[in-house]
Image (cartoon, rainbow, N blue to C red):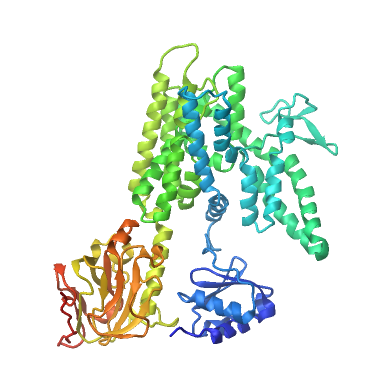
Amino acid sequence: MAKNYDELAKTIIQNVGGKDNVTSVVHCATRLRFKLKDEKKANDDVLKDTDGVVTVVKAGGQYQVVIGNEVADVYDAVVKEGGFNGGGQVPDDDVEDNSSFVDKAVALISGIFTDILAPLSAGGIIKGLVVLVGAMGWLSTKSCTYQILYAIGDSIFYFLPVFLGVTAARRFHMNQFIGLAIGATLTYPTMVQLAASKTVLGTLFKGTAFASEIHTTFFGIPVITMNYTSTVLPVLFTVWFASIIEHWAKKWIPSVVQMFLVPVVTMIIALPVAFIVIGPVMTWVGDAIGAVMSGVYNFSPIIAGLLMGALWQVLVIFGVHWGIVAVTTADLAALGYDPILGLSCMVCYAQIGVVLAIIRQTKDKKLKETATGAFFSGLFGVTEPAIYGITLPRKTPFVLSCIAGAVSGAIIGAFHSVLYIMPSMGFFAIPAYINPKGGSMTTIVGVIIAGIVAFIAGFALQMLFGKKSVDAEYNKKQAQKVADAANEAANITKSAPVQAILSEEKENPSTKLVSPLDGEVKPLSEIKDEVFSSGAMGEGVAIEPSEGVLHAPADGKIALVFPTGHAVGLNTTDGAEVLMHIGMDTVNLQGKGFKTLVEKGQEVKAGDPLVKFNIKEIKAAGYEVTTPVVVTNSKKYESVQQVAQGEVKVGQEILSLQGSNAEVKTTGQVQTN
């Protein structure tokens, strides 16, 4: 019978300050997340002592009531009791409030790009393929067909500020359509044309590295018009500034006219500031970096290559690499060649070398799919999906890609390879290193070597040093799922988590468990999932099933049946708490291929069927069916010993649990045909 959470919901609402104190409520995997008008009205101590509540956390402007595995049911009861508008489930926090500034910055940037990774990957692949067919002469670059295909691939990059305006607005909690309007204004055709205007009203910082031409004014204030298409930082800073203006405007503009006056005030203040201050400042930062790199190159091409290769991706993230592009344009016009930008053209292969290693290392099916798309996009030199979606959020892989990129830059510097035209992307940048006046091809060979070495170095560094960071969050979530299952299986309340149960001094009597499956029994340590193989959840065995029916390993009561059918918890009559988890990550199947035959609280005998599962269907979906059989209260026994090897049948003894009594109790065995 399902639990009734009405009383718990009433208690929670009462102690968060009542219905009138609640602005909104959503839930994540384990917590109710309230936004309260006044957190002082909430009664933390009462909630913490409430049966069904684990604890209370205040973070990120939210009042979080930690429930655990039953949060969705409690949430439904709270919404019903309070008459709230249901906001549904939301992702867990990216970074906790006590995280470092770097962690918060990385989480912010990655979060802004997460929603557009799919079109970024698609655009990168399409753009790369179009450039390829054009370079091979299979399609004229002047044909309408080529132009249409190129527009399809390039559009998201050209109008990147428009997309980022929306996602940044979401992260800064402001009207997303105002964010979209900000991005659109920055890339408005008239503003782009002004940046290339031959009309010069004056030059700011004339005679310095920061010399900037003024093409127009705003109420007499000089405006240094720049081309903001494909840029990142100007729109991010502008949206952040606009979010402050919007929140301020909402405080004094009457609610009856807020719908149109708040956007007016926000945009009329934020966008002129963007054109007059934010955009030019970002440009000057880029110019400064370009000037420094030119000086370093004149001192040592190899050192310049190391720095350029290591820092290029960082510069791209913050959108200040355009200063170096500007230096390249000037060098090509004045000297006929440029040595600086060319140092970075093979860094993309360092990035995708790391990504390929991550594809091999990860157990997360979703990450594998995302990384595969990013890898193919990166082959054509478009690494934004790989950076923002794969390596940067995990930090260590991104650092390793920068190290491998530094090696590629140093090699290009050592060969004195320089650009003679503005380069394309990745492999297609190689022709830009060919001297139109002829000469040795050694410099071209150096670029190719740099790309190969960057790829190998990135792959090797990630395989050697980056594995732990790949699935850190994924493993954490899986561990929490298993821990929740074990807690539920043991009927453990908030005051007695798994660790407390395991530390109790009193031992259980000796008993034994029989095999719940037909198949091959293996040591638990052979399971790929570290949560189980490490013994963190308890001792036991793993079984590779040959038949898709899970049986009871002893007499007892069902303590847990996951709705998806992939895991069952059993409390045996002798006190053992057993968790059986069919396959690895099979929770992602959402019940497909599983049929539960029992319900929570049901009494069972050893050998009774608990779950039917389709082995072929599960494997076809890309999941293993290796099943851990774990005694979650293992420390209640002197030892938990595997007593069977190789092939086993349902009802055959597989585990001996030695407790405080000398005699081992006999568990009913079931003979199967």
Q: Is residue 576 visible?
A: yes
Query: Does 359 sit above or below residue 301?
Result: below
* Residue 412 point in image, percent of width and height: 43, 27
- The residue at the point 79 percent across, 61 percent down is 258
Q: 306 or 261: which is nearer to us? A: 261
Snapshot quadrant of residue 653? bottom left
Q: 253 or 131: which is nearer to us? A: 131
Query: Does 640 sit above or below residue 361?
Result: below
User: Which quadrant is home to the N terminus?
Assistant: bottom left
Q: Residue furthest right?
A: 219
* Residue 85 point in image, percent of width and height: 64, 72
Q: Is residue 533 left or right of residue 143?
A: left
Q: Is residue 395 left or right of residue 625?
A: right
User: Which quadrant is home to the C terminus?
Assistant: bottom left
Q: Is residue 241 visible?
A: no
Q: 440 or 154: which is nearer to us? A: 154
* Residue 459 point in image, percent of width and height: 36, 42
- The residue at the point 33 percent across, 59 percent down is 623
Snapshot quadrant of residue 35? bottom right
Q: Is residue 348 left or right of residue 180?
A: left
* Residue 644 point in image, percent of width and height: 14, 71
- The residue at the point 35 percent across, 37 percent down is 456
Tag count:
0
Q: Is residue 507 left or right of residue 493?
A: left
Query: Does 442 sit above or below residue 510?
Result: above
Query: Does 308 sit above or below residue 57?
Result: above
